[in-house]
Image (cartoon, rainbow, N blue to C red):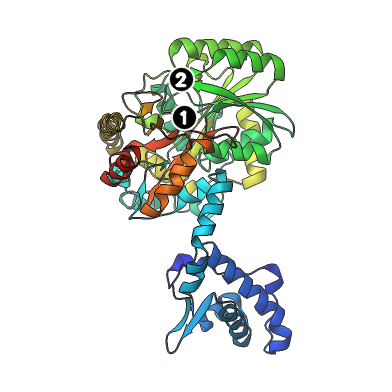
Amino acid sequence: MDDSRKATARRAPREAREPRDTRVGRGAPIAEGLARLIGQQIANGVYRAGDKLPSLREVAQLHRYAKNTVVVAFEILVAQGLVEPRRGSGFYVADRHYVRKPAEEEAGQLSRAMDIVWLMREQLKTQPDAVAVGDGFPPVEWLADMRMDRYHQKVVRTGLGSLFRYGSRFGYAPLRESLVRKLGDIGVHASTSQLVLTHGANEAMDLLIRYFVPPGAAVLVDDPGYYPLFGKLKLAGARMLGVPRLPDGPDVAVLERLLARDKPRLFFTQSVAHNPTGSDISAAKAYRVLQLCQAHGVTIVENDPLADFKPTSAVRLAALDQLAGTIHIGSFSKSFSAALRVGFIACDAALASDLADLKALVHVSSSEYCERMVDVMLREGHYERHLFRLRRRLEAATARALEVLDELGAEVFARPASSLYLWPAFPGIDDTVALARELMPEKILLAPGRVFSVDAEQLSRWSRCNVGALVDERFRTAMRARLR
């Protein structure tokens, strides 16, 4: 049994975490709680049809239960048809559970879903044999030359003492110094006092929402836009207002109307390598957006997770106003590794101090080990060569992906020279949720446009497509069959 699954099974519901009791009668409620936990893990796919469950002894040790209690829990699962015993081998997830319900579950999931949590779950799955056309990450082989095992010893040698304690509320100081230089390359001039390191770009957004957005407050977002942000704003009780995204940036006519009517606090946007459309803001549009937001006292939050994939000369709002009315968010998840979970916020120094305090209150600190790892990777000579190769690969993949979409007769929203994402609409297909449902049995995973919309109830003919996966022959064959 793989360690990750054992770890997943480690915690039982609160009602099950009681002192051990060898009497089955008194242990029955505990056994029922344990059976519910394992049953839920089977339903969620932690254990799949035919998987062997941990042994009775392992489960008893993990949960510190009497063996009799675990036996009763497994008997409950057998009676429910979820688990089957095999003499001399152990307990296995029953195949019939998966024969009974999968089609309904998938259909039900897709009919209500293709929602934020559904797509986040799909993005986090590892399915080596699937064609992840909707994937949010670059192909693994593009990042292989920045493997973390090459840098681990340097990280440990330079910071062994501090790695046993929490780090600074602002984050690892040498990495912030490296980021000052990195931001300077894209025209953003900042000091280390203006930088707060975070647990990825998503924690950065979470901190800003906590700081700026009380329940009921109006917030502007790109539409279509970054779907996890939508989920965070909904959790905060914000009133989310979509600014239509055009191929050259936000629709300024709608932006001006919403600014005057709704008095929003923030405008979350992506200037370059926009997720999901792949579009870049034009210089003229960028200046107009800044003028409008400045006139209405609205702070712009510019998310730039794909900065390493784009030329340093690309237009960025934070570079145009030097963080006067903008907050810049960055991350290394796409260019180094999502496992490192290192991001940052660049903003006014007074705000940075407040956000560092909020971060300390909510999360104590970010991971100094991961921050040291990123700093070592940035300072090594490999980094510049990595960026050069990364950008060359992306440019070539974008060109090939556009050829595939043209061959399929797709309408493409924007045609950048290089982008991890493209936003096509295929001829004759008005509902990409239905298309995604059709493709799933063929292990082709699509990201339907509805997920990225502020109004997730509306049908969408658009999809987010990853240029690294779009050229896979299985996808091309499947789409040709549907577009005849």
Which of the two labelled residues, at mark 1 and mark 2, occupies the earlier sequence position?
A: 1
Q: Is residue 453 above or below residue 82?
A: above
The kind of residue on which mark 2 rests is Arg
**Residue plotted at (52% across, 14% down):** 321
**Residue 136, picture quadrant:** top left
Q: Is residue 59 above or below residue 179?
A: below
Q: In front here: 31 or 59?
A: 31
Q: CA distance from mark 1 to mark 2?
A: 9 Å
Please provide percent x and percent y for residue 207: 62, 37
**Residue plotted at (52% across, 77% down):** 83
Q: Which mark is residue 304?
A: 1
Around disc 1, counting alpha carbons within 10 Å, would you say few (fewer than 14), some (14 to 19), or many (20 or more)? many
**Residue plotted at (55% across, 20% down):** 323
Left/right of residue 125 with respect to residue 59 in the rendered view: left
Please provide percent x and percent y for residue 55: 49, 81
Q: Is residue 251 visible?
A: yes
Element under disc 1: loop
* Residue with the mark numbered 2: 316
**Residue 380, picture quadrant:** top left
Q: Is residue 188 above or below residue 465?
A: above
Q: In front here: 315 or 132?
A: 132
